[in-house]
Amino acid sequence: MVNFNGNIFPRGTNILNSNNRGLKYGDALFETLRYVNGTIFFWEDHYFRLMASMRILRMEIPMNFTLEFLEEEITKTIRENNFGKDAIRVRLNVFRNDGGLYKPEINKVSYLIETSKLESPFYLINDQNYEVELFKDYYVNKDMLSNLKTTNKILNVVASVYAEENGYQNCLLINTDKNVVETINGNLFMVRNGVIKTPPLSDGCLNGIIRMKLIEIITSSEELELLEESISPFELQKADELFTTNSIIGIIPISKYRKKEYDNTISKSLLGKLNAKARIG
């Protein structure tokens, strides 16, 4: 079951038509959320990121789009799917309503909520091989639109195909300055000699929620130092660890890039702190 503007429909129902602006122009935003036992992990952060993104894209925010309203709509969708106490992946889509060409006729929006089961209620570390490679065919732009979680993800799609064709688990995306920005599905962190670096938002990376939470965790630690600085591809093979982050999986240690193999000691320690932060809210 899916939730379209507060109405519940069976999955597969023809809800959207050929004039949908998300389909035609990628005129849409989305949030992917982890829901466990009545709690949406880091919900306030997701909500305020969505509101800020809608303002940047000049979307009209409905008066009823409160934190509480959208949380209840998510909970209603989960309840209608009879998931019980399962861990749930939620995708909240917001798109400008039909009408117009590039220039929309109106700025009002609709929303669509989809849900599916997750294997574990909390973030886990996967010790399996996770090899990555640079994707150099196309570049991430260094601007604010790249920070937003929009449905304009064709670069990520093509990079995913490249990774599949070449036997990699993920790819590292680079910006127009040829600096490493992020992975296909998350933010990037690099560890070297106790210092953890992650690209700044000005380099064009996604303003990720788990990125934000890890920055909070690392900066409050006495053992670790955080730097928000550009990462050159040449630095990758000197690193002790690389890992990527997103709201569904949490932390994914990268085991290999080219001839360099990485440890995952720091990423494992951070994962425990991230799970604790998620439980607190």
Image (cartoon, grey):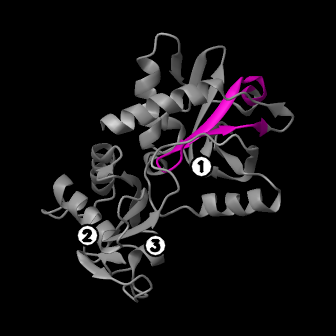
**Does residue 173 show up magenta in the picture?**
no
**Mark 2 highlights which residue?**
107
Relative placement, left or right, of 121 versus 113 is right
Above or below, comparing residue 16 to residue 108 in the picture: below
Residue type, mark 1 in image: Val
Total labels drawn = 3
Q: Residue furthest front?
A: 84
Residue at 60 percent of width and 24 percent of height: 266
User: Do the CB atoms of the residues marked 2 and 3 lie less than 8 Å apart?
Assistant: no
Residue at 27 percent of width and 45 percent of height: 44
- For the residues marked 2 and 1, what is the alpha-carbon distance in whole angstroms? 27 Å
* Residue 250, x across and y down, in percent: 51, 42
**What span is in magenta?**
235-256
Q: Residues within 10 Å of mark 2 (few under 14, many from 20)?
A: some
Q: Earlier in the sequence, mark 3 or mark 1?
A: 3
**Mark 1 highlights which residue?**
140
* Residue 41, x across and y down, in percent: 36, 46
Instruction: Decide if residue 82 is in sight here.
Output: yes
Q: Earlier in the sequence, mark 2 or mark 1?
A: 2
Residue type, mark 2 in image: Asn
Mark sitting on residue 25:
3
Q: Residue furthest top?
A: 222
